[in-house]
Image (spheres, rainbow, N blue to C red):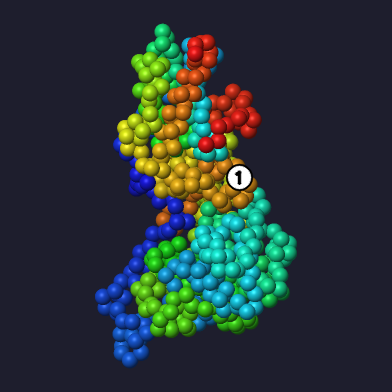
């Protein structure tokens, strides 16, 4: 299988790879997937005044999973939490030209975003 | 000088040896006769060339040249052996014994036989990938007509105790088929000493051309017969009709002759390269695991799992090296290697597996380059891996509640 140029670029130059302190109250962490399924994504957002000012990811998975999470962190930065919730896996599929067998990578990235937002909301006490 | 990309996937196929190609060339445009043409020089020449190849092949596996049936490859040979025996011996029984880690050419054929009413036993393997001979003994009944066990596994290179299986089969009066696609030409094969009745193998795994293989069919003690699956002009003693692929067969023969001559030096060289590769990787990286047997193993095979890093992303990083992975990230089912799973390797480590297949044309420089590149890529991907981070923090990944999707 050949990869799109954008997937290769994210794989070779991952954006925002790394971790925040998960105990920081302004940080929301989402960990989705399972090692036995071959992919685990950790996505973190750092929120200030309702705006996602920074994001980080770490991913165990194929190139498309890495690219999906890397792209997600790019898109998250500068968005409000509510705007971030609107990111759809289909947007990621389109941007990265993912083939059908890799759509689950984009689904995982969307799940990771939602999970990170939930974690943040839970910690900040907001509904 | 290192030439990129490097091919280190010699279990999938091999380059045609230039000596093989040279021997084949006259049979395309000059001596292009049909080996079944009995009344002119073109046919006679083609037949002579085929007979020479039959002799070269027979010598490599220690059989009579008449016992070689040419096919399109090992998949067809496997089909012919299983379906041919099932049909020919159906009055004798309806039970076949094979192994969970066989190639799909065996497993899918066995599934088809099951649909047609046959009963198939799939033996399990131990953590090294070998079958239990007592379990084999116990599985044989008076309805058993065939035991089919591969010589060496295509993923982990583990070598089965073939001679012992042959003895058991003989003692119980059951035909023994061996898929020796990965073994022939790489390790010594003797169908007499090993008690093999039917054996599949192909040319393209041993530096010959694609599209040609053979089924060894024992003629004496016992005389084994298989019903054909391809009907036609009655070629190959009626077991496989169709005009013989003369140039490819000529190449197959020469490929076998070279393997026989060079096997002692080649296998020593390849196992030294393999051990060098393994040594460099295991020295530089923690939590790398060998899959398969430490010693009962093809000399050119290395299969490892690199914990916390997914196999397909590893291959993506090693974009100038041709390797394969047990990660099934590209398949529709997303199931990792069934061979590794049969050994009891966890799905996570199966997803993290890499198969190296060294070959005749690989060099020490290539091995050093591949080891260096692999180590670089693993370090980079582990930096990116949430699992590695968790493991380093002391989290036991086995106790994490994962959202299995």
Q: Is residue B61 visible?
A: no
In the picture shown, does residue A30 fall above or below B92?
above
Mark 1 chain: B
Residue B330 is situated, as x and y percent measured from the top left of the image, at 43, 45
Seen at 60% across and 77% down, the residue is: B90
How far across and how far down the image is residue B267, in percent?
Answer: 52, 59
Which residue is nearer to you in this view: B146 or B322? B146
Q: Residue A26 vs residue A76: left or right?
A: right
Left or right of B62, for residue A98 = left
Residue B366 vertical placement versus B207 (above, below):
above
Q: Number of callouts in the render?
A: 1
Q: Compared to B182, does B77 lie above or below?
A: below
Mark 1 neighbour class, 10 Å CA radius: few under 14, some 14 to 19, many 20 or more = many
Secondary structure at badge 1 equals: loop
**Residue sitting at x 44%, y 18%:** A45
**Mark 1 lies on residue:** B345
Residue furthest left in the image: B29
Examine the rendering and report whether any part of residue B140 can be seen: yes
Task: From the top left corner, tell me how far across and down residue A97 is, in percent.
Answer: 32, 37
> Image check: B387 left or right of B312?
right
Q: Quadrant of residue B113?
A: bottom right
The residue sitting at the bottom extreme is: B39
| Residue located farthest toward the front when viewing the structure as drawn | A127
Residue ID at (70%, 68%): B140
Q: Position of residue A43 (x, y in %)?
A: 46, 24
């Amino acid at each position: 299988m050949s990869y799109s140029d954008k997937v290769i670029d994210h794989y070779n130059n991952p954006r925002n790879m790394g971790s925040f302190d998960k105990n920081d109250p302004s940080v929301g962490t989402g960990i989705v997937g399972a090692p036995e399924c071959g992919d685990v994504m950790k996505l973190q957002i750092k929120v200030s005044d309702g705006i996602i000012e920074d994001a980080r990811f770490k991913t165990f998975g194929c190139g498309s999973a890495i690219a999906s999470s890397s792209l997600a962190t790019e898109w998250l930065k500068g968005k409000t939490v509510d705007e971030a919730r609107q990111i759809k896996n289909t947007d990621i599929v389109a941007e990265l030209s993912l083939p059908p067998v890799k759509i689950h990578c984009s689904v995982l990235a969307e799940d990771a975003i939602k999970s990170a937002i939930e974690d943040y909301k839970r910690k900040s006490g907001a509904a | 000088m290192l030439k990129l990309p490097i091919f280190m996937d010699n279990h999938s196929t091999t380059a045609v040896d230039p000596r093989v190609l040279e021997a084949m060339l006259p049979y395309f445009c000059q001596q292009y006769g049909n080996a079944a043409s009995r009344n002119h020089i073109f046919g006679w020449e083609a037949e002579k060339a085929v007979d020479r190849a039959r002799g070269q092949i027979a010598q490599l596996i220690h059989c009579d040249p008449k016992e070689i049936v040419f096919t399109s490859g090992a998949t067809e040979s496997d089909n012919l052996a299983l379906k041919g025996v099932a049909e020919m011996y159906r009055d004798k029984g309806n039970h076949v014994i094979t192994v969970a880690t066989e190639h799909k050419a065996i497993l899918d054929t066995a599934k088809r036989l099951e649909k047609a009413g046959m009963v198939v036993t799939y033996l399990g393997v131990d953590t090294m990938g070998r079958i239990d001979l007592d379990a084999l003994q116990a599985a044989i009944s008076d309805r058993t007509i065939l035991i089919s066990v591969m010589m060496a596994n295509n993923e982990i290179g583990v070598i089965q105790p073939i001679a012992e299986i042959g003895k058991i089969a003989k003692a119980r009066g059951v035909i023994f088929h061996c898929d020796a696609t990965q073994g022939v030409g790489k390790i010594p094969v003797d169908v007499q000493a090993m008690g093999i009745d039917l054996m599949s193998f192909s040319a393209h795994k041993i530096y010959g051309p694609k599209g040609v293989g053979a089924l060894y069919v024992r003629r004496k003690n016992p005389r084994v017969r298989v019903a054909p699956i391809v009907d036609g002009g009655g070629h190959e003693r009626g077991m496989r009709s169709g005009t013989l692929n003369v140039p490819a067969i000529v190449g197959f023969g020469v490929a076998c002759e070279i393997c026989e001559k060079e096997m002692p030096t080649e296998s020593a060289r390849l196992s030294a390269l393999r051990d060098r590769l393994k040594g460099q990787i295991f020295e530089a990286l923690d939590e790398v695991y060998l899959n398969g047997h430490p010693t009962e193993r093809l000399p050119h095979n290395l299969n490892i799992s690199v914990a916390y890093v997914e196999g397909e992303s590893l291959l993506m990083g090693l974009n100038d090296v041709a390797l394969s992975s047990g990660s099934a990230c590209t398949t529709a089912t997303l199931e990792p290697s069934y061979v590794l799973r049969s050994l009891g390797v966890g799905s996570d480590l199966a997803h993290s597996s890499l198969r190296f297949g060294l070959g005749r044309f690989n060099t020490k420089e290539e091995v050093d380059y591949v080891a260096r590149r692999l180590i670089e890529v693993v370090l980079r991907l582990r930096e990116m891996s949430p699992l590695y981070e968790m493991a380093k923090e002391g989290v036991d990944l086995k106790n994490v509640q994962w959202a299995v999707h």
